[in-house]
Image (cartoon, helix red, strand yellow):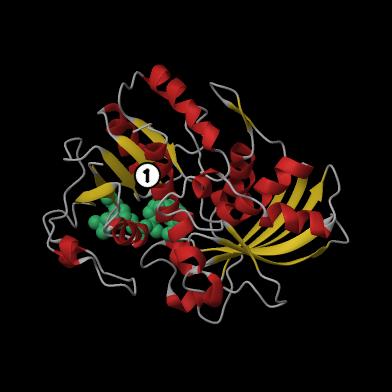
Amino acid sequence: MEKIKVGVLGATGAVGQRFAQLLANHPYFDLTVLAASERSAGKTYRQAANWVLTDPMPPHLADLTVQDMSTELECELLFSALPTSQATEWEGKLAEAGYRVFSNAGAYRMESDVPLLIPEVNPEHLGLLKEQQAKRGWTRGFIVTNPNCTSIPMTMTLAPLHAKFGVEAVVVTSMQAISGAGYPGVPSLDIIDNILPFIAESEEVKMNEEPNKMLGLFQSDHVDMAGIAISAHCNRVPVTDGHTVTISVRFKNKPTLPDILEAWQTWQPLPQQLNLPWAPQPALVVRSEQNRPQPRLDRNEGRGMATVIGRLRPCAVLDVRFVALAHNTIRGAAGGSVLNAELMVAQGML
Ligand SMILES: NC(=O)c1ccc[n+]([C@@H]2O[C@H](COP(=O)([O-])OP(=O)(O)OC[C@H]3O[C@@H](n4cnc5c(N)ncnc54)[C@H](OP(=O)(O)O)[C@@H]3O)[C@@H](O)[C@H]2O)c1
């Protein structure tokens, strides 16, 4: 198979660097374009990016020149790690110009004709692209988004349970890593020896809306929201990578704890069946120890793409409660976006 030429927008940032790492030697994609702001444009990637990952910068990218944003980038597909303001300005313009845009940003996620995709959860929502292109007059280009990094562990764990037992209500508390705020992100004097009980006005709104869209019913030109009542508390904690959530759930059809374990452990969604390059096998890892998952020990499970679950037990207020963890810049950002594009390749949609 001939590789598809791809680019990364916002290539110098926290998520952009993850894209560079995950796309090195990818079987479907050839990363040939790196773009960022005018501050970085014209410099080599080595000069422009303050590399923060433990794996070294892929050597073949180090001397590539970072480009300014434009609609004349020499590739077919773009992975976007732009800040929301820039994504709002550029992603639509690029899709109109014919690029296939896979975005991490919040700009288009809740638009009714834009798939908000987790390939394990709602692959059928890609059907919205027909409506998107018809409505916007885009012939070749489109936008597919992936969710906020904290929606990932929550939605991944709820998806197989919602399908079997019907989720009615959720109380979720996040403990979100510092890298979720990008680079340089949260000032060290604010976060060391501390917990910040506020991230942004929009953070808890995203936790409410995004799972309801992803778990909703695809209806050819829109998605009917799942209608789950969600109460979210979002906190920033002094962890470098890996978002942890504690979740209490009420169900329509009351499952036993073994029913829930079975639903998680037998879940074999589409990316795993298709054995996509970045699909974790298995998608959900259930730990039996009382003190897991922990970000430092569990965030790299499945090369950072798995969701790790633990501490399933009864809840005295709702029905059950548990803990879940996912790597925010891999599964919650760049890896999620790459998996979205892999699914479209495997389904002959690119
Ligand atoms: N971090 C996470 O865990 C995470 C998870 C999910 C989604 N996201 C989303 O992913 C996006 C990127 O987040 P991040 O954490 O990687 O942020 P970041 O570290 O601040 O990086 C921002 C990137 O955008 C570029 N940029 C800034 N202004 C620009 C402009 N005017 N034109 C073109 N490029 C510009 C920067 O380039 P310069 O270096 O040239 O300034 C940099 O490459 C955001 O929308 C965020 O909400 C992040």
Across and down, in percent, residue 309 comes to 65, 64
In the current view of this chain or complex, which residue is farthest to the right?
Answer: 316
- Few, some or many C-alpha atoms within 10 Å of disc 1 (few <14, some 14-19, many ≥20)? few
What residue does disc 1 label? 85
**What residue is at 52 percent from the left and 28 percent from the top?**
112
In the current view of this chain or complex, which residue is farthest to the bottom?
Answer: 193
Q: Is mark 1 within 8 Å of ligand 1?
A: yes
Quick check: which quadrant has ligand 1? bottom left
**In what quadrant of the picture does the C terminus appear?**
top left
Q: Secondary structure at mark 1?
A: helix
Across and down, in percent, residue 40 comes to 18, 57
Judge by depth and name the residue closer to the eye, 22 or 115: 22
Across and down, in percent, residue 51 comes to 27, 69
Answer left or right for 207 relative to 36.
right
Against 244, residue 95 (above or below) is above
**What residue is at 40 percent from the left and 62 percent from the top?**
182
**What residue is at 26 percent from the left and 41 percent from the top?**
1
**What residue is at 37 percent from the left and 38 percent from the top?**
345
Against 167, residue 17 (above or below) is below
Residue 238 visible at all: no
